Amino acid sequence: MLRELRGKYKGTALGWFWSLLNPLAATLIFTVVFGAILRVTPTVGANGVQNYTLFLLCALLPWNFFNGVVNGGMAAMLDNANLIKKTAFPRHLLVLSATVSLFVTFAIEMAVLAVALLVLGVNPILWLIPALILMILLAVFATGLGLMLSVANVYFRDSAHVVTIAMQVLFYATPVIYPLTLVSDVSPTSLVARLHIDSLYFLNPLVHYVEAFRDLLYEHQIPDLTTVLVVVLSSGASLWLGWVVFNRFAGRLAEEL
């Protein structure tokens, strides 16, 4: 874990400042393209604030963390192949250390977001503890997926390419850069009606995570019961399944590597 934290920005001129610059650059791009050019209208937040940048960041930061944990977990075994071959230790620690390292960065980014919300009139102080709990649940959910993908990527090297495409699709299938209301406003064609697009869309657990973060930080309201249940159950199920799959295939990692 300490090695992950120390080595992430080792040798760079800006060091940990890169952890803020990367999401800020993405935020600027999305704000210009979707907020200014395409004129995507964000929902109204607490105290009547309607700010696309704040609306975006409340979802983009959790998404970036999720994406980082999944990809970091998937690469953990291959990146540490020599260590696994030479040393006996619990292999799952490689995935967990990647999660912890990214969680520290995530916490820093969310702290900066909290300051931005406060300055722009959306005081998040009373909602920080629920948001922290939600951050932990997201970390658990992503770690479970990372555990499964870490062994899948050893046995099936095409996994990384499949996941890259899947994450691109998942990004746009999650209301990160647009409000959830746009999905409900899709014009009903016969095909869409047959597929029940709303029902399919909400099968994506990340929809509920993103909406929960926006509820807490941007709109200052408790997420609805369905969202809470999906978040809690999906995090527990993901970690349990990830643990089972990882332990099932971890025994032959050294040979496969």
Image (cartoon, rainbow, N blue to C red):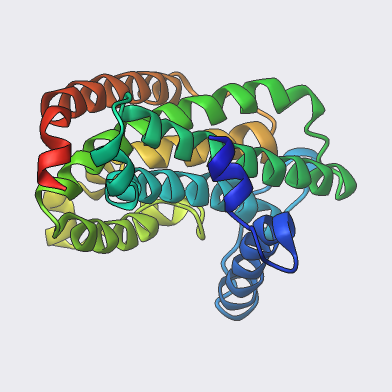
Q: Is residue 65 above or below residue 247?
A: below
Q: Nearer the viewer, residue 139 or 221?
A: 139
In the displayed orientation, state which residue is furthest to the front. Answer: 86
245 sits to left or right of 42: left
Q: Residue 125: where, in percent of width, then height?
A: 81, 28
Q: Residue at x 45, y 52 (%)?
A: 175
Residue that protrudes farthest toward the bottom in the picture: 37
Residue 157 occupies quadrant: bottom left
> Residue 50 location, x and y as percent?
72, 54
Query: Closest to the observer: 109 or 93?
Result: 93
Query: Could you tell me which residue is drawn at 64 percent across and 58 percent down?
Result: 10
Q: Residue at x 21, y 63 (%)?
A: 161
Taking the image as shown, residue 8 lies to the left or right of residue 151, namely right
Where residue 197 appears, x then y in whole percent? 24, 50
Total count of labels: 0
The residue located at (46%, 40%) in the rendering is 98
Q: Where does residue 160 sit, x and y in percent of width and height?
A: 23, 58
The answer to which quarter of the image holds residue 83 is: top left
Q: Report which quarter residue 135 is drawn in.
A: top right
* Residue 203 visible in the picture: no
Picture layout, residue 85 above or below residue 241: below
Left or right relative to 24: residue 49:
right
Decide which of 135, 124 is in the foreground and name it: 135
Viewer-side residue, 39 vs 138: 138
Q: Is residue 111 at least partly visible in the picture?
A: yes
| Vertical side of 153 occupied by 221: above or below | above
